[in-house]
Amino acid sequence: MSKSSSRKPIEIKISTVVAVSAILYESNLAVLDAAMQEMTGGNVDFFEDEFTVIDIGSLAPAHQAIDWHAITTLLKAYRLNAVAVRNATPEMEAGILAHGLSLDGPLKPRVAETAALPAQAEIALEAPAEVAVAVAPQAQAAAAQFAANTMIVDTPVRAGQRIYARGADLIITAAVNNGAEVIADGSIHIYAPLRGRALAGASGNTEARIFTLSMEAELVSIAGMYRTFEDGFPADRKKQATQIRLVGDRIDMLPIKSAA
């Protein structure tokens, strides 16, 4: 059998997609368009075709009906590609899915319509998948270089949070909780329990590794190859200090041995 004929017709790997959030405080299209015009100053290259999650959690309960086609078309005009909706209510689900959008996170129970529409509209954009690390201007060159290639997170990563260390290693000194996701183009070091998802080598670095002081993960991935733990952990790795590496197409878990 030739090499080409033995190739798999499809392969599924974990992929890292960073999206911005378009947080709506108003659903009136004309007002949103004016806000976007003001934000971008008419610059057609202000955005660069980023994937976008429409977050409607800040809309007043009495907001006017959302025209999903019109909203996505408006964002597309500013080079924002809507792919999902966050904080949708159950009655919105069918309309959202019918327009080719996904649901990001659980559906939000509908609140009684008691609040009035806000007097002024606003649209805010944020990148929830990334954490910025500021380097003081007076920092030494060596420290600045280290910061450029390493992201450090000192607080617990909560359920629903996603942290992405683009072009860097990721160091976390607190727990990564169930439902959280941490991603790095380099290696991931967690000096605490790993209970959520950890994706190292996200841009294809097969030499990246994951380290944790307590292995309790939902999923681990290196360079797109992944392993889940629905059936539990190997007895010698559960809640143990562990390093995770990629060997061929296999995710290996090894103990971290103390020098003492």
Image (cartoon, grey):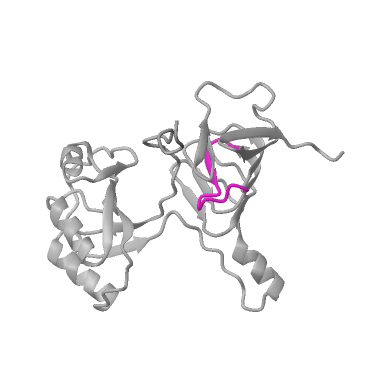
Range of residues picked out in magenta: 194-207
Q: Residue at the right extreme? A: 260
- Relative vertical location of residue 194 with respect to residue 74 in this rendering, above or below: above
- The quadrant of the rendering that contains the C terminus is top right
Residue 46 x/y as whole percent: 32, 72
Numbered label tally: 0
Residue 57 x/y as whole percent: 29, 50
Residue 10 x/y as whole percent: 37, 36
Write the residue at 43% across / 36% down: 7
User: Is 181 displayed left or right of 23 in the figure?
Assistant: right
Which of these two is toward me, 40 or 201? Answer: 201
User: Is 221 displayed left or right of 127 in the figure?
Assistant: right
Please check the rendered image and state whether residue 55 is part of the magenta-colored stretch, yes or no: no
Please check the rendered image and state whether residue 201 is part of the magenta-colored stretch, yes or no: yes
- The quadrant of the rendering that contains the N terminus is top left
The secondary structure making up most of the magenta span is: loop
